[in-house]
Amino acid sequence: METIRLTTAQALVKFLNAQYVEFDGKINRFVKGIFTIFGHGNVLGLGQALEQDAGELMVYQGRNEQGMALAAIAFAKQKHRKQIMACTSSVGPGAANMVTAAGVATANNIPVLLLPGDVFATRQPDPVLQQIEQTHNLSISTNDAFRAVSKYWDRISRPEQLMSAMLNAMRVLTNPGDTGAVTIALPQDVQCEAWDFPVIFFRKRIHHIERRVPSVESVKDAVQLIQSKRKPVIVIGGGVRYSEAVDAVIKFAETHHIPFGETQAGKGTIESTHPLNLGGIGVTGNSAANTMAKAADLIIAIGTRLTDFTTSSKQLFKNATILTINISEFHASKLDAVKVVADVKAGLEAITNELGDYRTDYGTEIEEVKRGWKNELTRLHNVKYGENFIPEVSSQLNEKLPEYHQALRTGLTQTEVIGILNKTIDENAIVVGSSGSLPGDLQRMWVSKERNTYHMEYGYSCMGYEIAGALGVKIAEPDREVYAMTGDGSYLMLHTELVTSLQEGKKINVVLFDNAGFGCINNLQMENGMGSFGTEFRKRNPETGQLDGPIMVIDYAKVASGYGVKTYSIHTTEELIAAIEDAKTQNVSTLFDIKVLPKTMTHGYDSWWHVGVAEVSDKDSIKKAFKEKETNLKKARAY
């Protein structure tokens, strides 16, 4: 057997260079590159291997381990999971920073390869710098924290273990039904140890991502169920995007005249202007989709995990039978569904071939609900300070609006700004989001004029994803403008990969909605009987001892300009439109520091979200909220 003597790290780099995927006859390199932040736990091992011969891998320099891993996840998501990035960190804090990102990847079923450094396998220098010593088990390190958030986890304590570990890693990374974060912990001494690796281990490997076909029995069950129903509604999830099954979905919907709503991951898969597209569905859905879903006798859930936001905490679909088409048997089995476990495209095509001339009984309902939502959308675009505020606005905070108006020097509303952006940026531009109130507003309001221009991470709703994610999307789509839609709370939590975008010459546009607080959670607490507590950005009041002093006004544009970003300070619609147009001419990353009034976002449309409410309280408003929660809970499906 021919061998080659390499360190573990060198062998790993050589192996990654030899991995390819095939999908529908197209073969592509699987690992695009590797994000790095070097420390003592990886610089002399994996760092040395990359310096010596990175092969075809692009090496990127991250600024925060979580941020770079989020960028890697966004890259894979935009590439429909057909190409990935790896990420390497040092031991201890560097590794721990990536744990959150691993959760994002696994929750969203997005492949990412994490390569954290680890403590010495020999244990001779223990406790090494940044090592946590568990007195009950010395085999535990920071990297064990990845176990709960990884689809596959391994630790390489001997060089020869790399072979089985990486083959298993590729198995999971290329499995559309059960992919997510793969963590390979690399003790820093083992990274540098040499071994005679078989040359065959480094041969070109083509991993075939197959379209799993459905069983004949499951197709028969699905066809019989559909034919027995008259008013079904389709729910489009991210699986439609990853399966590249858009044309199959459109053919199915148009042939049988079935309207469809979109989850956060599924939105933008099909143009918003399609006559059967109802728009966002669920807790953050609009009136058209939710009205139709409540009246449906069948929900056809395609490629969706059926999260609480999609199902409105299992209340939205309570009157319907559920049919699922999903590559994952786990997700297909939810809500006691009749299930078709298959690739989305293969499953839909099989059902369509057997469904014959079936057609729904819809008359003008679809057009009517879409017309109603269009009128509401026009209203939202024109909500202005002092005029037609959204009725659901909290009276407690509404009284503070003049204070915010004066402090932030703005009359802009969040829905007004979104409307202007939607009308003004390029039609093929990509918007990226993740957390706060913006995902709800965007799922409801954003009109996707071209496919794959809406990129939302909402499986984990990770604050800080937006800017890092925009960088990953830009690397995947270098010829398109990319806009990170973020609130001030999320921006403060993580924006460091903005510097990496400058370093790489990958222009992204950061659209920062500054309402001086964690506005989404402020809504949640006040709508459930609490006061405004710990969610507005205010200075501590020396008289009360509480965070109820003056509003904090932060000049984010000034901060970002120090990085070398082109910035805009925006307080009016005129300034916003001028900034959007000027940003299109820039070659460097931009930041729009937009001051918006709080409580000017959208609110629920015929939906309910199950959250914990205190059963015992001295406030009547919380007691009322608890009773309402219990009443709604009785209306929801039990499983």
Image (tube, helix red, strand yellow):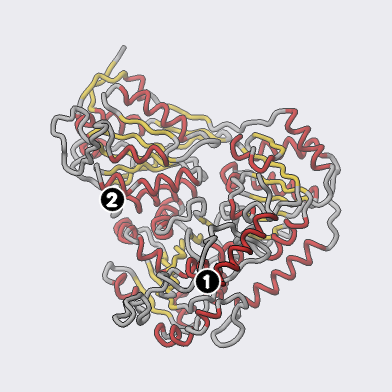
Q: Residues within 10 Å of mark 2 (few under 14, many from 20)?
A: some
Q: Quadrant of the N terminus?
A: top left
178 and 536: which is toward the camera = 536
* Local secondary structure at mark 2: strand
Question: Would you name the residue on which mark 2 appears?
Answer: 61
* Badge count: 2
Q: Quadrant of the C terminus?
A: top right
Quadrant in the rendering for residue 594: bottom left
Q: Position of residue 356 (x, y in %)?
A: 84, 39
* Local secondary structure at mark 1: loop
Residue lying furthest top = 1
Q: In this orientation, does residue 150 appear? A: yes
* Image side of residue 122 versus residue 17, left or right: left
**Residue at the spot 52% in from the left edge and 62% down from the top edge:** 616
In the image, residue 298 above or below residue 521: above
259 and 479: which is toward the camera = 259
Question: Would you name the residue on which mark 1 appears?
Answer: 619
Residues tagged 1 and 2 counted as in contact (Cβ below 8 A): no
Q: Position of residue 112 (x, y in %)?
A: 41, 41
Q: Position of residue 306 (x, y in %)?
A: 61, 48
**Residue at the spot 19% in from the left edge and 31% down from the top edge:** 189
Q: In this orientation, does residue 9 appear? A: no
Looking at the rendered structure, the kind of residue marked 1 is Lys
42 and 25: which is toward the camera = 42
Q: Residues within 10 Å of mark 1 (few under 14, many from 20)?
A: few
Question: Between tags 1 and 2, which lies in front?
Answer: 1
Q: Position of residue 8 (x, y in %)?
A: 26, 28
In the image, residue 531 above or below residue 485: below
- Return the disc, 1 or 2, that comes first in the chain's sequence: 2
